[in-house]
Image (cartoon, rainbow, N blue to C red):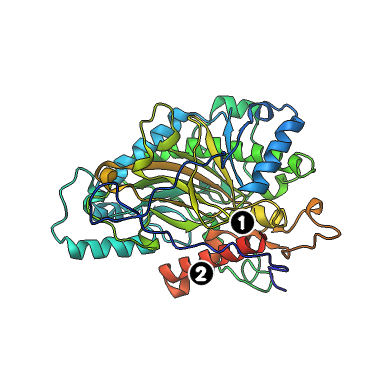
Amino acid sequence: MSLLLARGVPGQARPPPGRTPRDPSPRARAPRAAPPAAPLAPVVDVSGILAGGPAPPELLAAVRAACASTGFLCARGHGVDLSLVARCMDLGEAFFAQPRAAKEAQGAVGDMTSGRGYEISPEHRRFADEFAVRYPDGLAHPEWSAREGILSERFMVGPEVRGQTYARPLALSPELDRRRPRPPPPPLPQEPEGGWTDGRMAVPDAGAFFAPNRWPAGHPGLREAMLALYGECESLSAALMGLFAEALGERREFFEPMLRRHHSNLQVASYPSQAAPVPDGARDLRKKAHVDSGTLTLLFADDWMPGSAFSPERGGLELQLGDGSWQRCDVPAGSVLVNLGTVATVLTNGEWRSTVHRVANPDPGAAGDSLRRSVAFFHKPDPAAVVGPVAATVGPGRPARFAPRPVAELTRQGVIAKHRHLGAEAASLKYHEFMREIRDAQGP
């Protein structure tokens, strides 16, 4: 039985256009996306639900409208300690501020299957290798990664696993912990005989979802800060999933069973300055057009950290609209940007959107000093949980677009694990193709 039971009109992603330079430059590109007339990510205040209060009807209506429109919203009153976010960015920047060979030699190199350790996307690894051929002596620039032509890099962690249980993070925000007490760590799910499968896809080992974290030598503060922030994002994500359940007409606890053994990732990412012209092309963007897997993503970025002087000319997040055009996504300072992933698309029968987005390159005149940092939490349920459209999204005239299937078959780790025999780049392409299939099935 196919995952996709009915297909809507595909919203085909168009290749990123070139840019028109603001000044004479060999790095000719198309005009930067203009600010949208209306917010692509409406602002909602979630402080009340984090305090355990009821969700007002106007909040539920705003969430439904945002999720059915772009699948992006800005949450204020989120309770996450922004000084901890900034510390993770700073510690990540310190780790990235060394030669690529040193980062890879520290034992922090993770593969695309597990979502752990230091990663460079396969297409960006290839770009950096070609850059090294063009500039064998490197380029003069204060950022190591800019000297080596790295367009983006990241450090990723998952739930801290010891033995057969999650380890409680080293520290949690007292405010968040008081609002939502955490239950004792549950045991890890046991891998079913024959792997994670329902007959259509097999993931050979639970290590794809619960691999141990890989902490780089010489950066002890990174572990403490990232695990603390992981706990805060975990709590906020659980609260948002409760809000989403109520917006769908279910009780707040509806999604909790599938969240108890989640395999979420926390990522610190860096988009270095660009010391030399970057050719036009989809693979040469800081982050190519894509949709996220999982239920939701929490995103913090330099662009909207309080007091930031980050400007649009230095590149940033853009969303693709229904007509194929791109628009910058503006986020109020201090908010967290929340966007839906493809598991949410399946759960809502395509009624809530997972929208294509990308990270644009800087304008030519700003490229030499355009370092951008972000922290993202990719929330992903128990890989053994079976998900399909909830009852409120199916009925007369609203047939199910998706067949129920395990989460293991819908998230990055599982899909890439299935195709890892093809090599990292081919497996990554298979993953993004599958994400597009789900996105296209959500209809126009």
Residue under the image location 29 percent in, 52 percent down:
103
Residue under the image location 65 percent in, 42 percent down:
66
**Residue 430 has which mark?**
2
Instruction: Give me the C-alpha separation between circle 1 and circle 2.
Output: 15 Å
Residue under the image location 49 percent in, 36 percent down:
229
Closer to us: 215 or 376: 376
- State left or right for residue 257 relative to residue 294: right
Choose top left, top right, bottom left or bottom right for residue 198. bottom right
- State left or right for residue 377 relative to residue 407: left
Residue that numbered label 1 is attached to: 342
Residue 346 x/y as whole percent:
68, 57
Closer to us: 388 or 158: 388
The answer to whether residue 260 of the structure is visible from this angle is no
The answer to whether residue 116 of the structure is visible from this angle is yes
Residue 210 x/y as whole percent:
54, 55
Q: Is residue 431 above or below residue 156?
A: below
